[in-house]
């Protein structure tokens, strides 16, 4: 009997939210929080690291890009293991990486050791993307699945805001060149708490059912829904990783990988270097490097508020407007914002109009990216593939995004030095526009559908119900 017609799936799709739902949602959201925290705390720390270790622009870019490169490996490899070994085991393992290598990063004795530890830390960050999103998508009722996914991912903005605030507080309390060590070390504390709590969650009943563990799946589903569930065992899926690139799923693979790659070029390139860019565009001539770092970090914190507003809009609109429309709107706003900043470039003198354009461009970018593609590129891979390929597909998509992130972080300072800031920002505007085109060409809507409907076999008119085969 096919797995898409059982009372088991109906119960999961129409369950009322219970404490266990919220617990899994929160623990998944905190994984994203730690990613946001690390992204923005390293942005505050990099000027101090560069000053203390006398780094070149290339060295600075490599250290900044190390974690996203590790995240690319973690998402790609451990996403596939999540489909093979289960959601729960990897849910604990990926955060263990974060705890160990965040601590070691803060103890780094040179640029090489810092680069290595940041790369290994990134493996844990990247692995959490397919694991947490898959966990949440498989357990939430279908009517609010997108809202729960978007709200979980919104914790990235909260983590970013917290990271910038912590970085600023440390700068103001201890403006020493090695203050960056304290900035990085603080992330260990919440990570250990979440790590311990993640040992208490159940396995995904959808994964158990897909792997022939019908009785365990029924027990897990009853614990989650509070209902008595009848279901028949299903045969394991015959789908393999290579099917992501076959005729049935290739368009979906393009949809979830290319826009995420293009979006992360801008999100991470601009996100990590916002304080650095602000110090050049808005705060040139304002004292020594620590004073400018404080001023630009204060500006970054103000702009981070728009990241939070963007996610709030995404949560409110994701089910009503849909994933694809929000992604199109978001990419449009990103392109316009970067074009504004590209036109301003590096002002010859500080003026009121230039300052308004600079902060307006950053605010529009932060609002647009989080309202649209930063949330939707995380949601779509968790919905458009069947259970046996869900974490694998999401891992591939996240890996492509982290590759874009690494490119953005590494290339932004290098291109800025070679071509100038204005032209570099114009290239990010162009990447955002291409992301819009790919979304328009390959996108289809998943809002309001069950996972079995959204992740079913793709025909000419969109996804059909996926039949599990021997």
Image (spheres, rainbow, N blue to C red):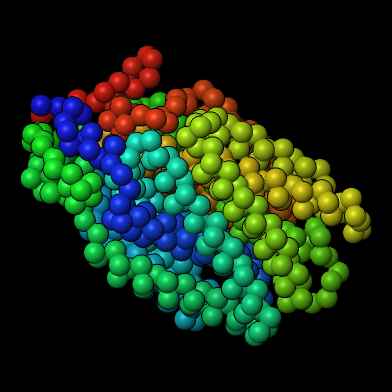
Tell me if 466 is positioned left or right of 192 in this view: left
- Residue 466 appears in the rendering: yes
Across and down, in percent, residue 238 comes to 16, 32
| Residue 415 in picture, x, y percent from top left | 68, 51
The relative height of residue 371 versus residue 120 in the rendered view (above or below) is: above
Q: Nearer the viewer, residue 74 or 131?
A: 131
Query: Between 379 and 320, which is closer to the camera in this rendering?
Result: 320
Q: How many marks?
A: 0
Residue at 56% x, 48% y is: 312
Q: Reply above or below: 276 against 378.
A: below
Q: Is residue 54 above or below residue 415?
A: below
Q: Residue at x 50, y 37 (%)?
A: 318
| Left or right: residue 206 compared with residue 144 | left
On the image, the x and y values in percent for residue 48 come to 64, 75
Q: Quadrant of residue 173?
A: bottom right
Q: Which quarter of the rendering shows the N terminus?
A: top left
Residue drawn at x 53%, y 31% is 321
Measuring 39% from the left and 70% from the top, which residue is drawn there? 191
Q: Is residue 85 visible?
A: no
Q: Residue furthest top?
A: 460
Q: Name the quarter where the C terminus is drawn.
A: top left
Q: Is residue 203 left or right of residue 160?
A: left
Quarter of the rendering containing residue 271: bottom right
Instruction: Report which quarter residue 434 is drawn in.
Output: top right
Image coordinates of residue 28 in percent, x first then y, are 37, 56
């Amino acid at each position: 009997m096919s797995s898409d017609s059982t009372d088991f799936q109906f119960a999961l799709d129409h369950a009322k939210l219970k404490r266990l739902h919220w617990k899994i949602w929160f623990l998944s959201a905190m994984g994203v929080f730690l990613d946001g925290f690390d992204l923005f705390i390293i942005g505050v720390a990099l000027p101090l690291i560069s000053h203390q270790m006398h780094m070149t622009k290339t060295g600075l870019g490599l250290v900044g890009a190390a974690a996203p490169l590790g995240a690319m490996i973690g998402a790609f490899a451990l996403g596939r293991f999540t489909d093979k070994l289960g959601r729960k085991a990897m849910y604990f393992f990926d955060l263990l990486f974060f705890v160990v290598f965040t601590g070691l990063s803060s103890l780094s004795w040179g640029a090489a050791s810092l680069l290595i530890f940041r790369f290994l830390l990134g493996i844990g960050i990247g692995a959490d993307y397919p694991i947490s999103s898959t966990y949440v998508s498989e357990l939430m009722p279908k009517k609010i699945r997108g809202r729960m996914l978007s709200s979980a991912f919104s914790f990235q903005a909260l983590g970013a805001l917290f990271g910038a605030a912590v970085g600023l507080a440390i700068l103001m309390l201890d403006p020493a060149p090695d203050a960056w060590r304290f900035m990085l070390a603080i992330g260990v504390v919440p990570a250990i708490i979440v790590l311990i709590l993640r040992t208490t969650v159940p396995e995904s009943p959808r994964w158990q059912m897909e792997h022939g563990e019908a009785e365990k799946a029924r027990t897990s589903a009853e614990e989650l829904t509070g209902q008595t569930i009848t279901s028949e065992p299903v045969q394991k899926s015959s789908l393999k990783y290579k099917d992501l690139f076959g005729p049935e799923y290739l368009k979906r693979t393009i949809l979830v990988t290319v826009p995420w790659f293009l979006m992360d070029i801008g999100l991470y390139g601009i996100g990590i270097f916002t304080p650095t860019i602000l110090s050049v565009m808005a705060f040139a001539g304002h004292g020594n490097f620590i004073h400018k770092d404080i001023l630009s970090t204060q500006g970054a914190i103000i702009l981070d508020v728009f990241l939070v507003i963007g996610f709030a809009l995404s949560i409110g609109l994701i089910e009503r407007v849909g994933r694809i429309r929000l992604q199109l709107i978001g990419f449009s706003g990103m392109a316009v914002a970067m074009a504004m900043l590209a036109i301003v470039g590096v002002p010859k003198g500080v003026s009121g109009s230039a300052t308004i354009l600079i902060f307006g461009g950053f605010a529009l970018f932060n609002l647009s990216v989080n309202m649209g593609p930063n949330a939707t590129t995380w949601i779509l891979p968790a919905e458009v593939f069947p259970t046996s390929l869900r974490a694998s597909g999401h891992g591939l998509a996240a890996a492509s995004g982290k590759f874009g992130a690494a490119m953005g972080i590494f290339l932004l300072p290098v291109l800025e030095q070679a071509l100038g800031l204005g032209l570099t920002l114009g290239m990010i505007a162009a990447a955002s526009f291409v992301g819009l085109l790919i979304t328009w060409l390959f996108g289809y809507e998943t809002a309001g559908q069950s996972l079995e409907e959204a992740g079913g076999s793709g025909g000419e008119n969109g996804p059909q119900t996926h039949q599990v085969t021997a």
